[in-house]
Image (spheres, coloured by chain):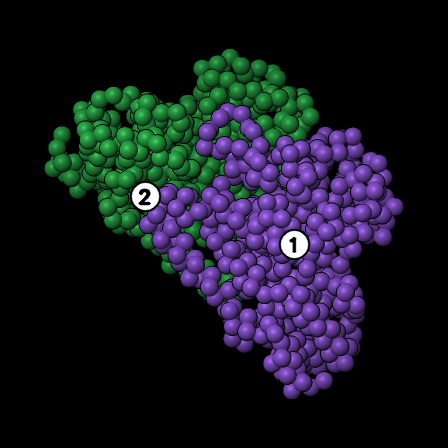
Chain colours: A green, B purple
Amino acid sequence: MDLDTIRAMDAADPLRDFRDRFELPDGVVYLDGNSLGALPKVTAARMADVVNREWGQDLIRSWNSNHWIEAPRRLGGKIARLIGAKDHEVVAADSTSINVFKALSAAVQLRPGRSIILSETGNFPTDAYMMQGLAHLSGGRIEQKLLPADQIPAALNDQVSVLLLTQTHYKTGRLHDMAALTRAAHAAGALVIWDLSHSAGALPVDLNGCQADFAIGCGYKYLNGGPGAPAFLFCAERHHGDVFPALSGWFGHAAPFAFDDSYEPGAGIDRFQCGTPGILGMAALECGLDLMLEAEMAAIRLKSQALGDLFIALCEDRLTGFALASPRDAAQRGSQVSIRHDEGYAIMQALIARGVIGDFRAPDILRFGFTPLYTRYEDVWLAIEALAEIMKTGEWREARFATRAAVT
Amino acid sequence: MDLDTIRAMDAADPLRDFRDRFELPDGVVYLDGNSLGALPKVTAARMADVVNREWGQDLIRSWNSNHWIEAPRRLGGKIARLIGAKDHEVVAADSTSINVFKALSAAVQLRPGRSIILSETGNFPTDAYMMQGLAHLSGGRIEQKLLPADQIPAALNDQVSVLLLTQTHYKTGRLHDMAALTRAAHAAGALVIWDLSHSAGALPVDLNGCQADFAIGCGYKYLNGGPGAPAFLFCAERHHGDVFPALSGWFGHAAPFAFDDSYEPGAGIDRFQCGTPGILGMAALECGLDLMLEAEMAAIRLKSQALGDLFIALCEDRLTGFALASPRDAAQRGSQVSIRHDEGYAIMQALIARGVIGDFRAPDILRFGFTPLYTRYEDVWLAIEALAEIMKTGEWREARFATRAAVT
């Protein structure tokens, strides 16, 4: 495998023209789109328009004239197409954490006689934390349980109201079998919430094909919605009418502008809105969604797997001392490859200093995300080149004692 | 009172130069800054910078290098200066509705033996709705009670855990006596949450002087933070250590990037953060805050009262058929004047068609907000002129059957 071969892969890539639709800084190999997606070029112009014209000139009238009021549903409908849902089953709103709470509190309400909310040890922390908050608030009626993934199926019993799992593990990229685990939960009478933060926009997801009950996910990773973009929530149509939302804000009311004293849930998915939507964030997220919807998800998945396979092959060919933390089988893996090294933190700092941006996850994981709309095969080559160079020169030793920085 | 006199008032206004710091569309008299504040000119450039440079070029590194991670606390500290709080008692986060839930769930936790959460009938609906959601989620342990304002003091007993009131009424602009009601609640052993949505940036607020326990409020009204801007939450320092947050997301964790399975509340006010903050919204809100902090709150209040007094005087001089819905005494009034008319909806539509933007609140209220940084005395004159003209020509009749539009 040489650079010519790799450049030929880029030349033959059916998605190659998408890269030019993104702003990417010179001299940077960006393999952290699973933490913050890159800026679509169109977003800059759209943000100027929403600020200057819609807010500045049209002011309050924009809620109607520029369709701000419809943004959560409109964006939800676009996200639905990426995750195998109907457009009236998804809403863009709030943060992923808040949406976890909405889904959890709805699920426990739908299974009133059951006390256990179940998830996986090592799941992305905010999922576990939001469960803990709900359990604490319940004053003992709800109990949180975290188990290693392989013990989950056996733990699904008639005391479990809901199973909350992240489809693509944030550290390793390991994929859960959504269909099988959903079936297992349903067989025990439990509901399932899927966290799609590292799945939506990264691989084909078929929520309704799997009979999923709820899902939540993130707008700022593979959906390229910008830092802290609005998140999303899916609730299967069959549950809509039975949920009285715990976060029953005025934007989820059946008639918000009637200003009644009493809350009446809005129709369908509308009841999962809460406060006034952040329109600037919505505008940026919509640009990311529109761009992604131009591509074929099957092509994205194919390239994502090829990028990951190439990374693993070059890694094993060129490097020693690293252990693969992700599944080797691309079918079992999301759109990232993680490798372990005891000096992972310092090595990642040295890589970033060379303009190769991945991220570090404690205690020892170097994580590289592949975003097929703008990641080239050559980027993978350059990343491995830099990594090999860093290990050869030992320059990572200088980064060893640098302050551990917070990156999301 | 003639136009020359009024123009002389504008010429003598110590805040007159602030108007030029805002984008205001030609031909519009904007009296709806209490629904959506106008765009500060500096915000457009700042938004381009946060999008193009911070997101586009610096990407994930911006969480540290451009201080995104500190935004909720940094903005909270700025808001604190407007509401009589210490900078470590306020955080900018989520929506007003979500923050109501955070404050309510914290307050009931601090008063575990008490079952009643109390508010006012006709309070801004989302406050009541969020109470209802919490009560529903509690499965009967918490009961929501809404009473007319004059019955609140007598209802404060040893079953009330928390009193939630909006300081400035959204419809009438009537001010509650924050100090007296907080004292009364405390005398009954209850806590108080103040909704400052129509107060922050509109008038001097002294939360700590009143010994308030919690407060929440809105970033997109008088703080000029943009549509759906992040909201804020105040928790008095004395309560920080005793609250285990119900919305216990990873951004409120003591060490978010340790990725532990178990939630440990962050120090102080940090625990009231939840998910990843929306950085685009934060950037716009910070521009509004910085601009507001250049002005003296005492000068803002003085002008706000004078604008309201002028509106009432001209209204009574020039119009018949309208009833004053706001307190006549400026000391009892926020930064708005509301008037009633049976045909209020149609009249407001006709006004908006003439470029005078206020808003309508069912069933019969025409609401006019005064934002002293950009509202001129002449704007009040022009609004009354237009209103008088509309009543004379009867052109409002044409707007009578227009679709009732949703505006926030």
Residue at mark 2 to residue at mark 1: CA–CA distance: 49 Å
- Mark 2, secondary structure of its residue: loop
Residue drawn at (70%, 51%) of the image: B207
Q: Left or right of A337: which side holds A388?
A: left
Q: Residues within 10 Å of mark 1 (few under 14, many from 20)?
A: many
Quarter of the figure that contains the C terminus of chain B: bottom right
In the foreground, A77 or B336? B336
> So how many labels did they put on this image?
2
What residue is pinned by disc 1? B83
- Residue placed under numbered mark 2 in the picture: A295
Q: Residue at position x 47%, y 61% from top? A: B43
Q: Residue at x 68, y 61 (%)?
A: B203
Quadrant in which residue B406 is drawn? bottom right
Please determine whether, in this image, residue B172 is positioned above or below residue B268.
Answer: below
- Say which residue appears at 17% left-offset and 42% top-offset: A11
Q: Above or below — where is A214 with respect to B334? A: above
Q: Secondary structure at mark 1?
A: helix
Q: Position of residue A251 (x, y in %)?
A: 61, 48
In the depicted view, which residue is nearer to us: B384 or A402? A402
Q: Chain of mark 1?
A: B
Based on the displayed image, in which of its 4 quarters is residue B60 positioned? Answer: top left
Asked whether B216 or B96 is in front, the reply is B216
